[in-house]
Amino acid sequence: MSAGDEAGARGLLRDREPVVLIDRKERTYLRVLRQGGRMSIRGNALACDALIGLPEGSVVETAGGDPLIVLRPTYAQLIPNLPRRAQPIYPKDVGPILLWGHIGPGDHVVEVGTGPGALTIALLRAVGPTGRLVSYEVRLDFAQMASENVTRYHGEAANWTLRTADAFEGLLERDVDRLVIDLAEPWRFLPVAAPALRPGAVLTSFLPTVLQVKELVDGLRAHGGFGCVETLETLVRFWHVRDRSVRPTHRMVAHTGFLVFARRLARDAL
């Protein structure tokens, strides 16, 4: 197969993969293609077989005649539509987690608190097949949903281990490159985190409130084994651009949480 043929084949929609369908009002619907199956979009039926084999970016019509653009979901489209019982970490925070947290191919990463698996998917994409991810989740229902979402929307991941366990009781891993924490009281977790991290490792914590941030930053500085502490918040504002109307959208994705980053020192400060 030539390079052009291979690229063309990659653009074709396949059985059992997720897609987003976007209507004329730019509303987005997340679905999974299943051969022989049918999906419903706002009460209008659409056969999966009519989509399988089409080039990504095709326009299809429901039984009611409504046009829909069909695409594979970007990460930013996937997360707001992800099945969940807990609030996910949204794409605007995931980007800084990966960049400021310095998470990339080949890294050994530990995640504490999976929620519905939104960040888990991003971490698996970032570390790639040469990296390793271990996730701790104390709640069985959250762990099951994360496992289902990863399988459905990311695929099989042989380099991912999901532990249904209380991370406060200890981490089995050592020489970890990156640690990502989504816990209500991460300052209590520092005595567990420090022995698991290699010198120079990055600790990242997602926190909803500034009072939690203060507790964690004070805890990191008092611990003695962490330095280079940084705190940030990401705000995102989309714009409406159509015809002669150019303005910010009416809804802004403002505060979702704070991010705290710190580096593991080679020796605990005296």
Image (cartoon, rainbow, N blue to C red):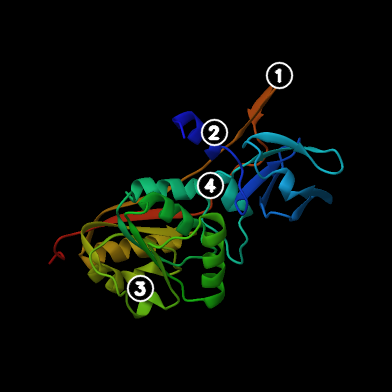
Q: Sequence-wise, which precedes: disc 4 or disc 1?
A: 4
- Structural distance between the alpha carbons of marks 3 and 1: 54 Å
- Structural distance between the alpha carbons of marks 3 and 2: 52 Å
Vertical relation: 204 (above or below) 63: below
Q: Which mark is residue 75?
A: 4
Q: In the image as oriented, which residue stretches furthest toward the right?
A: 64
Q: Which mark is residue 244?
A: 1
Q: Quarter holding the C terminus? A: bottom left
Q: Which of 78 and 251 is in front in this view?
A: 78
Q: Dot 1: what SS?
A: loop
Task: Give amino acid for label 3.
Answer: Arg
Q: Residue 188 carries which label?
A: 3
Q: Dot 3: what SS?
A: helix
Q: Is residue 126 left or right of residue 35?
A: left
Q: Sequence-wise, which precedes: disc 3 or disc 1?
A: 3
Q: Dot 4: what SS?
A: helix
Q: Which mark is residue 8?
A: 2
Label 2 Cα crowd, 10 Å radius (few <14 / some 14-19 / many 20+): few
